Amino acid sequence: MSISGELPGGGSDGEEEVFINEEDIIHEITIDEEDLPDRDDDDEDGGDRMDDSEDVDDSTYIFQGHKDEVFTVACSPTDASLVASGGKDDRGFLWRIGSAEGALELTGHRDTVSTVAFSSDGNLLACGSFDGQINVWSTATRSLQGTLEGSGSGFEWLKWHPRGHLIIAGSEDCNVWMWNADHNAILNTFAGHSSTVTCGDFTPDGKLICTGSDDATLRIWDPRSAQSRHVVRGHGYHTDGLTCLSITLDSQTVVSGSKDSSVHIVNVNSGQVVGSLVGHTNSIECVGISSSYGWAATGSMDQKLIIWDLAHQSNRCTCEHDEGVTSLAWLGSSRFVASGCIDGKVRIWDSLSGDCAREFSGHADVVQSLAVTADGNALVAVSTDGSARVFGISMFK
């Protein structure tokens, strides 16, 4: 028998036979070629290769207190290291960046913690759940201050008044609820939507409330009377449920996104649709307005983040992703905006050029929510992989 092979130094053109004597054979094994592993074409050079599926982890800190998917995150507006997160494990946590010790479990919930938010002065933290309760915690004493309840239906989101300790929350019962968190007292119930209230906020001046619903309407409310000033719906507006909204700093304009791929601009005072931002082709998942520029950013399942000039209602630039965009956050007053994606990546985009300035790897599954620390040095991302990861962004201030 013989084994044909290239002799050392023999060159690639000529082959010579190397003979093995029968008496040198100790044992012969028959191998079925079908049992042999397929040869990877990438390994033809014989070199050891790093598994491409193992991405580099660019995070500077990982919080792993959750035991299931993490859906929501918020950063304290006054303490640059303090973060809250909540998830599918029915748990919320108050924890510090860089510290593995002392995380406070926000106990008491019996269903997914869907929303967390700090009061504007940073003294209180509200933690809302699909169990129909909002628990309010003191960040100083790390103790439960009170429990706010509605009808028992789950809460989708909550927001604090921009200057006080009032909380509003949107419920699956079609209502918006408002409480005084200092006294654990219901102040008003806003009734009018005919389906789950999916998004909402106070106007930045604190004088009005804007809410969007699965019923495809936007309502603008008077917080004192709990009456609708305007109901925005029908021709020229969304044809399917609203998913997100954001209000300009002057409290004059609300930008809303829908499952129907449309983005519309509404005048808060008149309740009139004053423009449409056309460019997406799938459900809008997130919207955010720059605090320094007259620009808005929208992210969609169509794998695009689009930066819009609101004054001209025009597309400034389109930022392409490999998969759907789930979340976004403007980085303070800078021109940079972060996006979270189904592929687990967090990307930083220059809104002037549309270029991707940085891509952060680390998460192994969908990025669900993003938040920026008070000092602007870090971005916190949470994911269905069960972790919260912190990425350094000081270079983008």
Image (cartoon, rainbow, N blue to C red):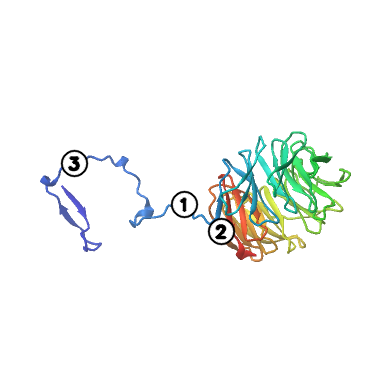
Residue 81 sits in which quadrant? bottom right
Looking at marks 2 and 1 on the same chain, the residue that comes earlier in the sequence is marked by: 1
Cβ–Cβ under 8 Å for marks 2 and 1:
no
> Is 300 in front, or is 249?
249
The residues bearing labels 2 and 1 have C-alpha atoms spaced at a distance of: 15 Å
Q: Which residue is mark 1?
A: 54
Q: Position of residue 42 (x, y in %)?
A: 38, 54
Residue found at x 66% / y 36% = 111
Q: Which residue is mark 3?
A: 28
Q: What's the amino acid at mark 2? A: Glu
Q: Position of residue 179 (x, y in %)?
A: 80, 42
Instruction: Give the mark toward the camera: 3 or 2.
Output: 2
Q: What's the amino acid at mark 3? A: Glu
Where 107 falls versus 290 (above or below)? above
Which residue reaches farthest right?
225
Residue found at x 57% / y 54% = 98
Q: Position of residue 152 (x, y in %)?
A: 74, 33
- Crowding at label 2, few (<14), some or many (≥20) Cα neighbours within 10 Å? few
Which residue reaches farthest left?
23
